[in-house]
């Protein structure tokens, strides 16, 4: 029997039982759809995180007290501005060193107010991190040196406090202290559901007075190039450990952050795909079941085909193709469903979704494979039927 | 191909034993029989006598437990399942009491079915099937489905299917059993004229004495042996 003929017969058999074929396919459709959608969401989330970490700036080294450990609470910093000076001496370029001291405070302008993240920073921040200014300017060295009460607002803060006016030159009060707005950041938008435009930058010296502290929460260094970045981190950690005996420090690079986050999201995506894969497996069992019913129902047909010259192999191939066709059509429909679901999730929720060609190829391959695996037993059973017995079956 | 090898079917001391719930049941106990080319043979006997078993053996649907069986000159014992299937396709044509037509399939495609397993193109299959349907007088029913045909017409389609491969022998199992006597007579007449015209050997299993009387030769089988 020619293969083209076998396909035609398989297709005709599926058409003859449209409802049953459709319901059997549904199991595969849901399984493949779930795999495609969940992998797309997992991949999208991973890409988004990577984009954000990379968006911080290149060749970045972040120095914080304590161990870099995503499972423990952050330790309270004992770093001060004199440590920053020491780090600057190692780096040899003040413009490559950024620091923060962070606190949450209410920012007011007239009757409007908004709870914001207040970052006490050096004037170097836009050079170390990727931040661009939409209006006005950024902090200057003299703002930092003289602890001026000036602030640069995040786009979201500016929108809330000054919906109709240009904020630059206006007054705001932060924790009850008056500041003059000198600039507004370009909007970053939302990412993973977090508003990134809710921060306010003020000189670190001003922040120390405002928060009544002299601590520095973290130091970030922009290395001149990628190759020296690990050695630079080790020198900085060694220097800080010497200055603060008994305290541990860690220097972490973007690659390390990306690696850790990528691993976590990769595992998460894998687990989601595996759970979805179980539903695909259940769909496959359904295919197997229906194929067995189909073989039993068409026992007389099998007997007749054998009587007129069908070999066991011809009959086996016919039923195997039927199962593969069932899962392949289900697989294609499942891919469409998965893509649709991913697009819907990406549009309706902050979670991005990225449909990758390899996920589609894998889902289709697996669904066709499911057809083969779960079609083999019914097909073999059909092929081995004794024609005499099969013809006698009513 | 059978013409060159003499007899269409040659059986020597053929036995067939079934295992039913662990008990050996002898359906055929040493049957010897030769069907020559173009001959017509009726096998008669009461139900349970083993005549259906014999027909299945003669058609290569089953194998003898012992004995020698040549179909179209080929020794059945030496053929595997695939080769036996090919033998059925090339040498034998079956006509069943209950027609065994595929539902939802046109008369034309039913007749063309055996040619599918010869790897012929759809075009060639349909041409041969159409020719065969004309020979059984159904050229006006080619695109009808079995449920749109009368019993006699269905059996004619089945006969056309059996003969479309130009077999050496046509095996008919109670071909008139599901038909009224007038229709049965016309189907029988068709079988006889095909037997006479095309030289295909005809083996008819029946319990109907009138049907049997029309054959060249009658073989009576009882309790698994020819009497």
Image: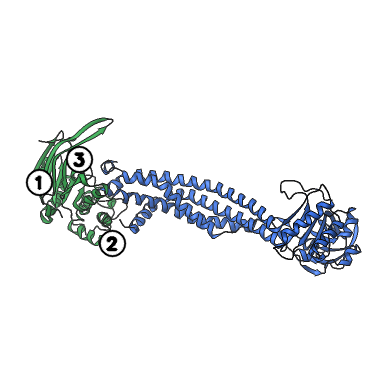
Front of the two marks 3 and 1: 3
Is B162 situated left or right of A334 in this image? left
Mark 2 element type: loop
Q: Give the answer, above or below, for where B30 lies relative to B132.
A: above
> In the orientation shown, which residue stands out farthest toward the bottom?
A136
The N terminus of chain A - image quarter: bottom left
Front of the two marks 2 and 1: 2
The percent position of residue B153, horizontal first and vertical second, equals 22, 52
The percent position of residue A45, horizontal first and vertical second, equals 64, 56
The percent position of residue B51, horizontal first and vertical second, equals 17, 39
Is A86 situated left or right of B55 in this image? right
In the rendered image of the structure, the colour used to display chain A is: blue
**Quadrant of residue A141 within the rendered picture:** bottom right
Label 3 vs 1, first from the N-terminus: 3
Q: Residue B64, which numbered label?
A: 3
| Residue occupying image coordinates x 35% and y 51% | A317
Front of the two marks 3 and 2: 3
Badge 1 is on which residue?
B215
Mark 3 element type: loop
Q: Are the residues at dot 3 and dot 2 in contact (C-beta closer than 8 Å)?
A: no
Marks 3 and 1 sit apart, C-alpha to C-alpha, by 26 Å
Say how many tags the image has. 3
Marks 3 and 2 sit apart, C-alpha to C-alpha, by 35 Å
Q: Are the residues at dot 3 and dot 1 in contact (C-beta closer than 8 Å)?
A: no
Q: Residue B121, which numbered label?
A: 2
């Amino acid at each position: 029997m020619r293969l083209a003929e076998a396909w035609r017969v398989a297709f005709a058999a599926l058409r003859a039982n449209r409802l049953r074929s459709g319901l059997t396919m549904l199991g595969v459709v849901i399984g493949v759809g779930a795999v495609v959608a969940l992998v797309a969401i997992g991949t999208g989330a991973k890409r988004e995180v990577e984009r954000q970490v990379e968006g911080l700036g290149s060749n970045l080294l972040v120095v914080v007290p304590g161990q870099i450990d995503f499972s423990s609470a952050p330790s309270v910093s004992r770093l001060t501005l004199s440590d920053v000076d020491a780090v600057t001496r190692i780096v040899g370029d003040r413009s490559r060193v950024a620091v923060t001291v962070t606190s949450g405070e209410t920012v007011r302008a007239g009757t409007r107010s908004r709870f914001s993240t207040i970052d006490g920073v050096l004037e170097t921040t836009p050079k170390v991190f990727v931040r661009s200014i939409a209006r006005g300017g950024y902090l200057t060295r003299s703002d930092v040196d003289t602890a001026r009460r000036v602030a640069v607002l995040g786009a979201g803060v500016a929108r809330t406090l000054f919906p109709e006016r240009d904020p630059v030159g206006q007054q705001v009060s932060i924790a009850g202290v008056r500041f003059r707005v000198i600039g507004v950041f370009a909007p970053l938008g939302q990412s993973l559901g977090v508003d990134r435009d809710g921060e306010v930058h003020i000189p670190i010296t001003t922040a120390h007075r405002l928060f009544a502290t002299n601590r520095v929460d973290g130091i970030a260094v922009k290395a001149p190039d990628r190759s020296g970045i690990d050695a630079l981190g080790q020198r900085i950690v060694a220097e800080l450990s010497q200055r603060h005996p008994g305290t541990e420090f860690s220097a972490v690079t973007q690659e390390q952050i990306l690696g850790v986050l990528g691993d976590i999201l990769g595992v998460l995506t894998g687990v989601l795909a595996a759970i979805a894969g179980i539903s695909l497996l259940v769909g496959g069992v359904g295919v197997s079941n229906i194929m067995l019913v189909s073989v039993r129902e068409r026992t007389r047909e099998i007997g007749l085909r054998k009587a007129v010259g069908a070999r066991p192999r011809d009959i086996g191939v016919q039923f195997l193709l039927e199962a593969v066709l069932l899962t392949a059509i289900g697989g294609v429909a499942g891919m469409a469903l998965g893509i649709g679901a991913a697009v819907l999730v990406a549009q309706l929720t902050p979670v991005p979704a990225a449909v990758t060609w390899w996920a589609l190829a894998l889902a289709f391959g697996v669904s066709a494979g499911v057809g083969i695996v779960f079609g083999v037993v019914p097909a073999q059973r059909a092929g081995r039927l004794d024609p005499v017995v099969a013809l006698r079956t009513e | 191909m059978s013409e060159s090898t003499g007899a269409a079917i040659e059986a020597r001391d053929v036995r067939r034993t079934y295992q039913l719930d662990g008990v050996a049941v002898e359906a055929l106990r040493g049957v010897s029989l030769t069907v020559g080319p173009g001959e017509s043979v009726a096998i008669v006997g009461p139900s349970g006598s083993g005549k259906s078993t014999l027909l299945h053996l003669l058609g290569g649907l089953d194998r003898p437990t012992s004995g020698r069986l040549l179909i179209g000159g080929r020794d059945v014992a030496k053929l595997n399942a695939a080769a036996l299937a090919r033998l059925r396709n090339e040498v034998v044509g079956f006509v069943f009491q209950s027609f065994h037509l595929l539902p939802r399939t046109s008369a034309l495609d039913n007749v063309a079915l055996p040619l599918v397993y010869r790897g012929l193109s759809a075009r060639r299959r349909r041409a041969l099937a159409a020719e065969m349907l004309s020979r059984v007088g159904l050229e006006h029913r080619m695109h009808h489905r079995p449920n749109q045909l009368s019993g006699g017409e269905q059996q004619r389609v089945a006969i056309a299917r059996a003969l479309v491969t130009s077999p050496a022998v046509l095996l008919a199992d109670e071909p008139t059993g599901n038909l009224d006597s007038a229709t049965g007579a016309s189907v029988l007449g068709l079988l006889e004229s095909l037997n006479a015209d095309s030289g295909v050997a005809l083996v008819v299993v029946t319990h109907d004495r009138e049907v049997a009387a029309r054959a060249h030769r009658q073989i009576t089988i009882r309790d698994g042996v020819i009497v």
